[in-house]
């Protein structure tokens, strides 16, 4: 039997929401092993002079816990 743990993160990017999701995953990979899935909960952005200047992605990352 395996146990899956969920880690909640917010990734950010100056290019796109997809890049923000990738950045969150890249950061998680630095300290978390056995990542099995990602759930995108939502997107937000920072606006300056009527343009999006920072894209943000709220995600949950699932990984198998090793015993």
Image (cartoon, rainbow, N blue to C red):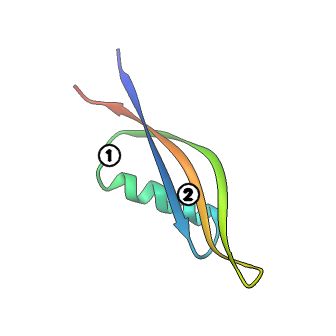
Q: Which label belongs to residue 21? A: 2
Q: Residue at x 56, y 63 (%)?
A: 20
The secondary structure type at the circle numbered 1 is loop
Q: Residue at x 74, y 85 (%)?
A: 49
Whether label 2 touches label 1, CB < 8 Å: no
Quadrant showing the C terminus: top left
Residue 21, image x and y in percent? 56, 57
User: Left or right: 53 with respect to 49?
Assistant: left
Residue 35, image x and y in percent? 41, 41
Q: Residue at x 62, y 61 (%)?
A: 18
Q: Residue at x 48, y 62 (%)?
A: 23
Image quarter for residue 55? Answer: bottom right
Residue 59, image x and y in percent? 54, 47
Q: Which label belongs to residue 32? A: 1
Q: How many marks?
A: 2
Q: Earlier in the sequence, mark 2 or mark 1?
A: 2
In the current view of this chain or complex, which residue is farthest to the left? 67
Quadrant showing the N terminus: top left
The secondary structure type at the circle numbered 2 is helix
Q: 46 or 63, which is in the foreground?
A: 46
In the current view of this chain or complex, which residue is farthest to the right? 50
**59 in relation to 50, above or below:** above
Residue 15, image x and y in percent? 62, 75
């Amino acid at each position: 039997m395996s146990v899956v743990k969920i880690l909640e993160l917010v990734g950010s990017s100056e290019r796109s929401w997809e890049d923000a999701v990738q950045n969150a995953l890249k950061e998680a990979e630095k300290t978390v092993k056995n990542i099995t899935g990602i759930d995108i909960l939502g997107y937000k952005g920072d606006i300056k002079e009527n343009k999006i200047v920072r894209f943000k992605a709220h995600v949950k990352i699932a990984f198998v816990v090793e015993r």
